[in-house]
Image (spheres, helix red, strand yellow):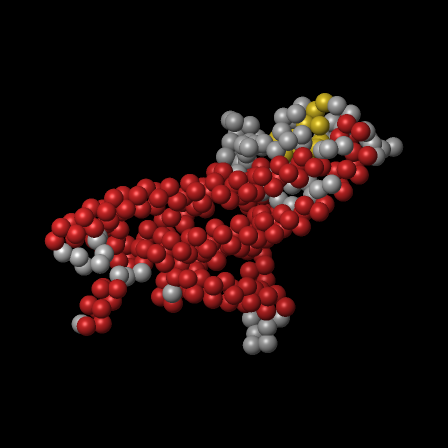
Amino acid sequence: MALPLTSLPFSPVLAVSAKASELFGADVLSFITNSVIVALCVLGIVFFFSKKATTNMTLVPHKAQNFFEFVIEFLYGRVESIVGHKQAKLAFPLLGTLFIYILVSNWFGLIPGVGTIGFGESTGPLSIVDAHDPLLRPPTADLNATLALAVSAFLVWLVLTIKEVGVWGFIVHTFGPKGGLKGIMGMVVGAVFLFVGVIEIVSIVLRPMTLSVRLYGNIFAGESVLHTLGGLLDKAGMPWSFIGAVLFPFPFYFMELLVGLLQAIVFTLLCSVYIQLSTTHDDHGHEEGDHH
């Protein structure tokens, strides 16, 4: 005899929670949330595939090795074309890892049940969970996780920038006047570039927040759209509620696949551009170097 839906331990979630849910309560392992569990699953998937692809490597690559090498070579070529050959060697381990991790996390959230099956006090004919606590949720739909990714990228950007141009070189690059003008016009241009430098410092400080909120907002919005479409016929009763939950969101899954890929590209691309902008020497610096 089939159990009624209200007797199942987990039930459909009414709406997407903006906050990651603690799985074991506030007093016991409070740091383990539903997004942390999925983050560990994503790491396990990436580690497992990379280990499988790089074990017993041969000149004639097997399928896993061939696909892994294709992905790495493609990503490295894109990063190198932006940051240059020298910086690519240093920045690619982070940037390549960020892209793969974000992409897998975004697509993991589209697996049926992730973000849609939850626990809590339930009511109604379909046992909708009013607590809005999904059992699993993608880490990129958790602002804590996206902020951690952005801060990691920011710290690597800072290290690469200081290593390449030095502290004084960064100050001159940010606040120094360009154009080599002298006299009154030189002073005016210097004041303008000083003001522009202040704005640049503010934008640099805000980069971790803008990176994290952009990624979080797009993935969270995609989850909300799928939830809304899947619940349009919840009050119609079975079997219409089940049919609506499957058919209405289905076309949007393809859009979310594209959004997940684009957001991984945008995050990695912006990090690459930030590194390129701060590690590129001024023209006069190159000329002096060439002269010496």
Quarter-of-image position of residue 136: top right
Residue 178 coordinates in the image, percent (x, y): 23, 56
Residue closer to the observer: 208 or 221: 221
On screen, 118 above or below 104?
above
Name the quarter where the C terminus is drawn.
Answer: bottom left
Residue closer to the observer: 261 or 139: 261
Quarter-of-image position of residue 46: bottom right
Task: State left or right for residue 51 relative to residue 2.
Answer: left
On screen, 55 above or below 252?
below
Count of marks, rendered view: 0
The residue positioned 34% from the left and 45% from the top of the image is 204
Name the quarter where the N terminus is drawn.
Answer: top right
The residue positioned 14% from the left and 56% from the top of the image is 182
Quarter-of-image position of residue 6: top right
On screen, 79 above or below 243?
below
Residue at the extreme front of the image, as rendered:
185
Residue at the extreme bottom of the image, as rendered:
59
Residue at the extreme left of the image, as rendered:
183
Q: Is residue 259 visible?
A: yes
Residue 73 coordinates in the image, percent (x, y): 51, 67
The residue positioned 28% from the left and 59% from the top of the image is 164
Task: State left or right for residue 108 relative to residue 154.
Answer: right
Task: State left or right for residue 53 relative to residue 237.
Answer: left
Residue 62 coordinates in the image, percent (x, y): 62, 70
The residue positioned 35% from the left and 66% from the top of the image is 86
Residue 168 coordinates in the image, percent (x, y): 21, 53
Q: Is residue 90 visible?
A: no
